[in-house]
Image (spheres, grey):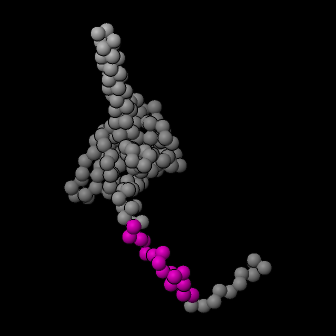
């Protein structure tokens, strides 16, 4: 009887450890990890397509998290997504010609906003808008382009794929 009870206790501990591991992984993959809200300043960016970008998604520079997405709205007049970013005040030296892009972590991971600093001597201030943006690239679009083709079909002969030159090329005297 005691051996059966020890099996039950061992099984219960194993299940409890499994649920603890699942809880830890859930917090690590849902952008709840390393989420701290200190003093921030807001930046706005407009995108034509944000893909699956969510609230609290990371904002990164050079792969380092410097903030998070705090608001996503659809602007009815422009039909674009207006994304509000909360950037940690420690990173207040972002040039005002920086670019924002929506990227995916890994092949099927969460999406985040990546900022690429520009070279302007002027810096962003609270409430400024990032003008240079690049929308999310959808995996479905890439697969569709690959399957349908983008104009050059591999079944065509090489001479059909190249446009005909009207005049023969003249040799460049600098190469001789």
Q: Is residue 26 visible?
A: yes
Identify whether 123 is placed above or below 152.
Answer: above
Drawn side of residue 66 relative to residue 16, left or right: right
Identify whether 10 is placed above or below 93.
Answer: above
Q: Position of residue 25 (x, y in %)?
A: 37, 31
- Main SS of the magenta part reads loop
Q: Name the one closer to the observer, 71 or 118.
A: 71
Q: Name the one closer to the observer, 77 or 171.
A: 171
Q: Residue furthest front?
A: 1
Q: Residue furthest right?
A: 176
Residue at 48% in and 80% down: 156
Q: Position of residue 150 (x, y in %)?
A: 42, 71
Q: Residue furthest left?
A: 76
Residue at 29% in and 52% down: 81
The quarter in which the C terminus is drawn is: bottom right
Residue at 43% in and 36% down: 66
Let me know if residue 140 is in the magenta part.
no
Q: Position of residue 172 (x, y in %)?
A: 71, 81
Drawn side of residue 42 relative to residue 151, left or right: left
Location of residue 164 by image quarter? bottom right
Location of residue 41 by image quarter? top left
Query: What is the total number of numbered labels drawn onto the structure image?
Result: 0
Q: Is residue 100 visible?
A: no
Q: Name the one closer to the observer, 50 or 70.
A: 50
Question: What residue span does the magenta drawing correspond to?
Answer: 147-165
Q: Residue furthest top?
A: 2
The quarter in which the N terminus is drawn is: top left
Location of residue 8 by image quarter? top left
Residue at 32% in and 55% down: 49
């Amino acid at each position: 009887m005691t051996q059966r009870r020890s099996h039950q206790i061992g099984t219960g501990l194993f299940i409890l450890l499994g649920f603890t591991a699942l809880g830890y992984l859930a917090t690590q993959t849902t952008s709840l990890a390393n989420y701290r809200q200190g003093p921030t300043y807001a930046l706005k960016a407009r995108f034509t397509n944000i893909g699956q970008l969510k609230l609290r998604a990371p904002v990164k520079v050079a792969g380092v998290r410097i903030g998070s997405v705090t608001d996503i709205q659809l602007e009815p007049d422009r039909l674009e997504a207006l994304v509000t970013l909360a950037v940690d005040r420690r990173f207040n030296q972002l040039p005002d010609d920086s670019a924002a892009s929506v990227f995916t972590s890994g092949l099927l991971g969460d999406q985040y906003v990546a900022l690429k600093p520009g070279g302007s001597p002027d810096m962003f201030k609270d409430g400024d808008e990032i003008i240079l943006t690049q929308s999310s690239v959808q995996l479905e679009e890439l697969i569709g382009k690959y399957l349908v083709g983008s104009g050059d079909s591999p079944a065509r002969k090489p001479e059909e794929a190249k446009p005909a030159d009207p005049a023969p090329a003249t040799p460049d005297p600098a190469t001789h």
